[in-house]
Image (cartoon, helix red, strand yellow):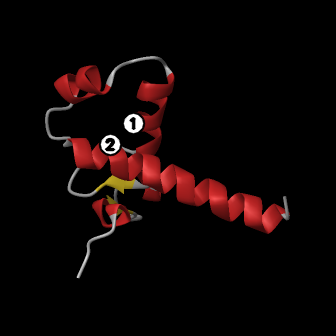
Amino acid sequence: MSVSPLDRISVDPEVRFGKPCVRGTRITVGEVLAYLAGGREESELRADFPQLAHEDVLACLAFAAERERRVTAVAGL
């Protein structure tokens, strides 16, 4: 049985107001994406947040890609 990268993301209304977070942390997907979009390297991100693994960063990207796919499908684009 394969594990989806999205299994590394959790949504809990009791954590960070229900924002998607890297499982087992309070680091939101949005924070990871903003860090990378701001031009920072993954190595810098992981140095600032040592609890993140490379697979967590990939899971955040996969989560964003899936959300984009769903928004595009709903909009009919």
Q: Nearest the camera: 23 or 57?
A: 57
**Residue at the (36%, 52%) spot, across then down:** 59
The residue wearing badge 2 is: 57
Image quadrant occupied by the N terminus: bottom left
Does the CB distance between marks 1 and 2 fall below 8 Å? Answer: yes
What is the number of the mark on residue 32? 1
Of the image marks 1 and 2, the number of the one nearer the N terminus: 1
Q: Secondary structure at mark 1?
A: helix
Q: Quadrant of residue 14?
A: bottom left
Q: Residue at x 47, y 55 (%)?
A: 63
Disc 1 to disc 2, how far (Cα)?
A: 7 Å
Q: Is residue 26 visible?
A: no
Tell me residue 10's x, y (percent). 35, 63
Rate crowding at label 1 as few (under 14), some (14 to 19) or many (20 or more) other CA atoms within 10 Å. Answer: many
Using residue 26 as the reference point, say whether residue 31 is left or right of it. Answer: right
Q: Is residue 1 above or below residue 45?
A: below
Q: Is residue 69 left or right of residue 41?
A: right
**Residue 10 got which mark?**
none
Residue 44 image offset from top left, x and y in percent: 26, 20
Q: Residue furthest right?
A: 76
